[in-house]
Image (cartoon, rainbow, N blue to C red):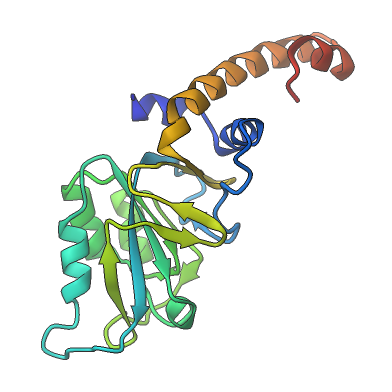
Amino acid sequence: MNLDYLSRVLYSPVISDILDEVGIYNHALPSNILPINPEYVVVGYAYPMYVSEANDFDPNNPYRGLIEAVDAVPEDSVIVIEVNENVRGKAAVWGELTSTAAMARGARGVIAHGLIRDVNQVLRMGFPVFAIGHTPYDIKGRGEFKSHGVDVTVGNVKVKVGDLVFGDINGVVIVPREVMSEVINRAIEKVNKESTAKREIRRGTLLKDIWDRYKVL
């Protein structure tokens, strides 16, 4: 699958529409997860991680779980970080050095259901990062990466290793790998119909006629 091509021609609402059509209604991550740059588009294969409270904090090795998780990131992945609700608003789970390491591993971006930091530095890198907000607080002593490469639930959406992740300014959608090819092919087909419909609307065609003809809106 040509991920760069998909990032150019698709957008999350059209993928969401197709997921609805195939009967997968819980597919959009919480709406407060947004790109740090509104122009960012990310598409790749999910590599989930989970951050818990720092119950077993080791001051001599405070980043052990984080290091293990980032070093294991596969190429073309989108890192999806679910954060325990007691940590979510208290500490950054991502920053400049982790972004640098993830890029070096071939990751395509990060979706964090939590806070991040080093925002200016990450923006200069051009690495697509999505989060619910920013904070200067470090994760050390506040949270720890407890697992990686295992399924997580973000909001009410289950994210499995290898699912397709597509994120843009509209939000983040998860396409289960079992229906990935069907959903993407139908989404591309719908985008092509919408392009034709837009040309006809500009020429004065009524929306009713567009709907009757193309079933897009």
Query: Vertically, is 121 above or below 166?
Result: below
Between 148 and 171, the residue placed more toward the observer is 148
> Residue 29: x and y, percent?
54, 54
Q: Residue furthest left?
A: 60
Query: Vertically, is 104 above or below 30?
Result: above
Between 31 and 55, the residue placed more toward the observer is 55
> Residue 12: x and y, percent?
56, 38
Between 92 and 184, the residue placed more toward the observer is 184
Which image quarter: residue 195? top right
Residue 169 lies left or right of residue 217; in this view the side is left
The count of marks equals: 0
The quadrant of the rendering that contains the C terminus is top right
Residue 71 lies left or right of residue 154; in this view the side is left
Residue 16 lies left or right of residue 37; in this view the side is right
> Residue 123: x and y, percent?
36, 55
> Residue 56: x and y, percent?
24, 88
Residue at the image point whose x is 38% and y is 49% from the top: 128
Residue at the image point whose x is 57% and y is 16% from the top: 189
The quadrant of the rendering that contains the N terminus is top left
Residue at the image point whose x is 15% and y is 58% from the top: 71
Which image quarter: residue 145? bottom left
Query: Vertically, is 44 above or below 101?
Result: above
Query: Vertically, is 66 above or below 62?
Result: above
Which image quarter: residue 84? bottom left
